[in-house]
Image: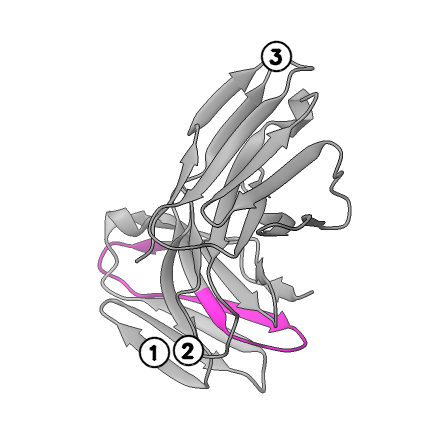
């Protein structure tokens, strides 16, 4: 299957600083990338959807000025957590999809390994 | 969006069978997925159903009834390594939404 990487795999930062997380599709062109957040013992919550070359679409309740998403190329999307606070500590997972969504197409969305963010 | 429900926890014995149920409500149904997630790791794909019926893949099988908004994941011959969270996810026309996950604990 397709490979999606994330960097860093874990990061610890101080409150008030910004952290950038990279998501790369290694062997396919990702027209759409998704960013999820997962708190302990909870499910993945979609934060935003980004299409290459256009602005990201944020889910309700997610602050676009705090979680900056850039999808500048077909293989790279970045999530920047600005002015991080302890409540932003979470597991951030990106997912990439190439092409159009069609019925019967099952292997379209691939997940990265996740980034564990701890804000102290 | 979707409303996806699955049990929070299940416990079973090594070698046994466990069935994890998932019910959902959605418009524009475009497939149901099951993922396995170990603690601290990203989800890994297990199965996909878009038509009614049973899909079998080794020790894991998944069933779908679109009219009932119902699916289950069947894990056979449980092994200790199967202890994980199992996520039911439903896709509509454009996005994938996840249930809260079912934590399965396999005991010796």
> Dot 1 falls on which chain?
B
Residue segment shown in magenta? B12-33
Q: Which mark is residue B63?
A: 2
Q: Nearer the viewer, residue A4 or B92?
A: A4
Q: Nearer the viewer, residue A109 or A51?
A: A51
> Dot 3 falls on which chain?
A
Q: Nearer the viewer, mark 2 or mark 3?
A: 3
Does the magenta segment cover residue B31?
yes
Q: Quadrant of residue A120?
A: top right
Other-residue count near label 3 (Cα within 10 Å), few / some / many at <14 / 14–19 / ≥20: some
Q: Earlier in the sequence, mark 1 or mark 2?
A: 1
Q: Give the labeled residue for mark 3.
A: A14
Q: Residue at x 29, y 76 (%)?
A: B56
Which element type, helix, strand or loop, lies under badge 3? loop
Q: Is residue B24 left or right of residue A101?
A: right
Q: Residue at x 57, y 58 (%)?
A: B99
């Amino acid at each position: 299957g397709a490979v999606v990487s994330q960097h860093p795999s874990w990061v610890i930062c101080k409150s008030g600083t910004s952290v950038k997380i990279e998501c790369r599709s290694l062997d396919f062109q990702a027209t759409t990338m998704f960013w999820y957040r997962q708190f302990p013992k909870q499910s993945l919550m979609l934060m935003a959807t980004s299409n290459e070359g256009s602005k990201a679409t944020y889910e309700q309740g997610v602050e676009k000025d705090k979680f900056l998403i850039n999808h500048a190329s077909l293989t790279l999307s970045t999530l920047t957590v600005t002015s991080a606070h302890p409540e932003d500590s979470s597991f951030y997972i990106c997912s990439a999809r190439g092409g159009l969504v069609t019925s019967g197409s099952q292997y379209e969305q691939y997940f990265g390994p996740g980034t564990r963010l701890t804000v102290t | 969006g979707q409303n996806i429900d699955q049990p929070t926890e299940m416990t079973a014995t090594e070698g046994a069978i466990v069935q994890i149920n998932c019910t959902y409500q959605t418009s524009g149904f475009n497939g149901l997925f099951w993922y396995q997630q170990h603690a601290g790791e990203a989800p890994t794909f297990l199965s996909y159903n878009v038509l009614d019926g049973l899909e079998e893949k080794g020790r894991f099988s998944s069933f779908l009834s679109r009219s009932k908004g119902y699916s289950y994941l069947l894990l056979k011959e449980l092994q200790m390594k199967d202890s994980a969270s199992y996520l039911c996810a439903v896709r509509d026309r454009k996005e994938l939404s996840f249930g809260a996950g079912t934590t399965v604990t396999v005991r010796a």
